[in-house]
Image (cartoon, coloured by chain):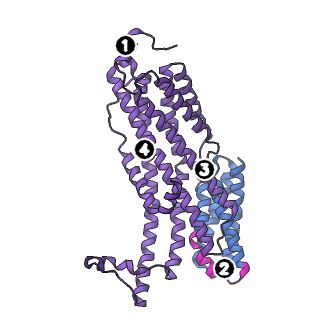
Chain colours: A purple, B blue
Amino acid sequence: MNELGSGTVRDRRFLCRGAALLVVFLGLPCGCKTSDDAAAAASQLSSTATTLANYYAALDTLVSETDQLYQIQAAVNPIAPYDSQTQTLVKDTQTEIEQREKLASALTTMAQTFAKFNGSTAASDASTAAGNLNSAVTALKLPASMSPSNVNLMKDAVSLIVKAIQEHKEREAAAAIDKFTGALDTWFTSEEPLYNSIGETYANLTLSLIQPLIEKGQVDASSFLNAVFSPYGLTPQITDTALRNAAQSVLAAQTSKKSAALAAAQVTATTNMEKSLSEMASRIHTVATDKPMTLRSAPATLADVQNWISLVPQIAPAAAAHTR
Amino acid sequence: MQGPLQELETTYFALQSQINTLAAACQSQDQRNALSTQYVQARQNYWACINKAFHDDDPAVATLTNQIDTANQQIQSATQEMGDIAKVINDITNVVNLGTQLAAKVITL
């Protein structure tokens, strides 16, 4: 039974067709203005969830690259063999990150379905999308560095969303979406140290591999002189031993700074992703509790996360191509 | 004191970043083998914990975490001196063994 059973409200809903399904769930009691707010919230949730999925894809690339780096390390340094147990653990971690990516993708699809709601099939579309989200949350069978209660909270919320959509209980659905986005933020926060540790492992590993290789002269140090030669269209070639050694020392020092910058950039991206999720949860809560939500653009910190995501394929092109 | 993940991370990162220096300081194949074993175990402990949820409030985990914190500080000062590689490997073995116990506790929680 529809809990918003009055004819007046139904008429309003009819007039507001074309707005998000969240409009129906979150906005009906207050009319079209609130419906606009709900439509904006659905669209912003979709952008945030897309960025979250891309964040996990970038993290997946770093784990894949780490796996390759361990293989390289084992080849160049017999003291660091890549044992099968660690290989399995790294692969398991990658699977877990991929499951989080799927969860974020399922949330994106659900938010997009809400945003496109304008026809008679919308309820079944939304129900299907919510069902997919339910499957994605259920698939998170190996919670790493997180409180299982956060996952359970999300599972409960998704169950409520599915049930409420099927039974056309809009208010309950709104409350459940509110609960889900809140739990998602808490869950992401609880896993932040894990994500940052993965990024730091990657940066640390590349550094420990590159420095001895540079010291052994296994790099063409002539690129160090590019700034001098390139204005004249010339290609540098270092033949002087003393100059090559000096250039190698400079390159080795640069790698330390770049490694620290790699790790710091990932930490910043994680922080900004959390801020975006927190902001989104707050906006959804505002709309779900019938308050005006005047913001019309996605959380500002999303752009910073997207910037880091766009850098990862340049940092790790081989793994990025492999995981794509 | 840091949390369990951070302690195991510290041990693993310290070995990862020092592995070439430590290997160069080894004077026998036995020492190189011991170092290799400890490095692999430390890395395995780290990844095992990445894969599992932590319960920082568990008293046994907290105690072990504290012990590893102390041991990590010891190996950091030992690797700076590097005069006695046998002692350094002994300190590393000590901290990695504690890390293995911590990883086992975290995994079974």
The span from disc 3 to disc 1 (Cα, nearest Å) is: 47 Å
Q: Earlier in the sequence, mark 4 or mark 1?
A: 1
Q: Viewed as shown, does residue A191 lie left or right of A85?
A: left
Label 4 secondary element: helix
Q: Name the amino acid, label 2.
A: Ile
Residue A276 at x, y = what percent? Answer: 42, 43
The mark nearer the N terminus, 3 or 1, is 1
Amino acid carrying label 1: it is Asp
Residue B34, image x, y percentages: 71, 74
Residue ID at (49%, 28%): A126
Q: Which segment did they paint magenta?
A: B15-30
Residue sitting nearer the eye, A251 or B19: A251
Answer few, some or many: residues within 10 Å of disc 4's Cα (few below 14, many 20 plus, some between 14 and 19): some
- Dominant secondary-structure state across the stretch colored magenta: helix
| Disc 3 to disc 4: CB gap under 8 Å | no
What residue did someone put label 4 on? A275
On residue A11, the disc is 1
Question: Label 4 vs label 2: CA separation?
Answer: 47 Å
Q: Which residue is mark 2?
A: B85
